[in-house]
Image (tube, rainbow, N blue to C red):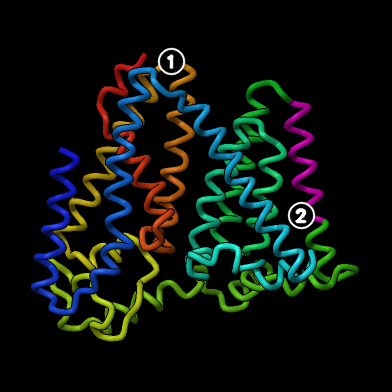
Amino acid sequence: MIFIFLIFSTLSFLFVSILSQNADPSLYLISIVPFILSYCVGYVISELYVNKEIDLAECLRLTCAISTFFCILHIVASIESYGFLEAFAFRGEDSIFGFFSIYQKLVYYPTILSCIFIISLFQKNKVYSAIILVDILIIGSRESVLISSIGLLSYIQYLYKSGEYYRALIYTCGAAFVVIVLVFSSSFWLGMLSESVLINKFISIAHSGDISAGRLSAINKVFSETGEDLNIFWGTGYSMIVGDFRTPHNQFLEVFLRGGLISTVVFLLVIIHSVSNGVKAAMHSDYKDGSTYSLLIVMCVIILISFNVNTPLRAPFSGILFGTILGFFFNTKLRKNI
């Protein structure tokens, strides 16, 4: 079935290419193929997990460790290039991820990091969590900082409900201390932080009053420029030159723009089926499996939320993570893995 899905998607692209006459294969290869292939990989992983051939919890811990390693590389490279404080103003070093575009690294990479940050919190990897959070702050993504903050508050609430009041207090005081230091340092003895990309982004939103940070105007511009090139059924195709538009900064609208109503419906059905199956698997499994499933669902939901302000599937590594999770939960055998 998975391979049929892959073949169907390829034929769909060829069909859309013929209709649009301006399709760009590279755009299709970057955004669609990694997602579909990772979807297949996720399904294979679920089969191995059900058959007790791999330990998924250990895989998550390894993922946190690998992410922390790359964060350390990025932080060290940024400090070496700019200095610690200046790194927050320049959004860190870019050449260390030279095989990705700067836009993909700055916008989508921290979204993935916020997922890993929350996972490391609930796995009680304090060192990993702290290093990943510093890297997120350096990169300066608003969405990732907000997601990480919500994850931290959720973890504090989890500690409080589980009776770990002392640890909950430590985390609360630590978070409050960091906020106080950032606020005072931005206007007092560490004035360089006032040039932080992240702080300036929030200031800009406060002054403009546009909580969408320009997303609504981008959506209006994109759809106004497509004009007659947009067909409601198959969209504009994977084209880079139709009109003069780029992206509506919304993944759901991006799918509709490129593939029309048909692609949007299929995309939503795949998401709904996989996520709902994952929730059922978590509810019908024992504590260990249920906890692991729940963490994966959290990561999936975080990415779905980011769909409203960005187009993560255009970045291969974001599409790979999302596709793997959906493919994993597609397997109905997970509900029997008790």
Q: Is residue 233 visible?
A: no
Nearer to us in this view, 148 or 128: 128
Q: Is residue 123 above or below residue 180?
A: above
Q: Tell me where the magenta segment starts and ends, as one range.
A: 165-180
Give the numbered dot on residue 162. none
| 4 part of magenta stretch | no
Q: Which residue carries the number 2 mark?
A: 179
Q: Is residue 268 left or right of residue 298?
A: left
Name the secondary structure under disc 2: helix
Foreground mark, 2 or 1? 1
Q: Which tag, 2 or 1, sits closer to the chain's start?
A: 2
Give residue 182's position: percent from left, percent from top: 78, 60
Name the residue located 42 percent from the left edge and 24 percent from the top edge: 54
Residue type at mark 2 is Val
Name the secondary structure under disc 1: loop
Q: Residue 134 appears in which quarter of the rendering?
A: bottom right
Name the residue located 58 percent from the left edge and 54 percent from the top edge: 146
Q: Is residue 40 left or right of residue 184?
A: left
Contact? badges 2 and 1 (CB < 8 Å): no
* Image quarter (top left, top right, bottom left or bottom right) of the C terminus: top left
Q: Which residue carries the number 1 mark?
A: 286
Q: Residue 75 appears in which quarter of the rendering?
A: bottom right
Give residue 275's position: percent from left, percent from top: 32, 38
Residue type at mark 1 is Asp
Nearer to us in this view, 320 or 266: 320
Q: Is residue 139 visible?
A: yes
Name the residue located 79 percent from the left edge and 64 percent from the top edge: 84
| 174 part of magenta stretch | yes
CA distance separating discs 2 and 1:
38 Å
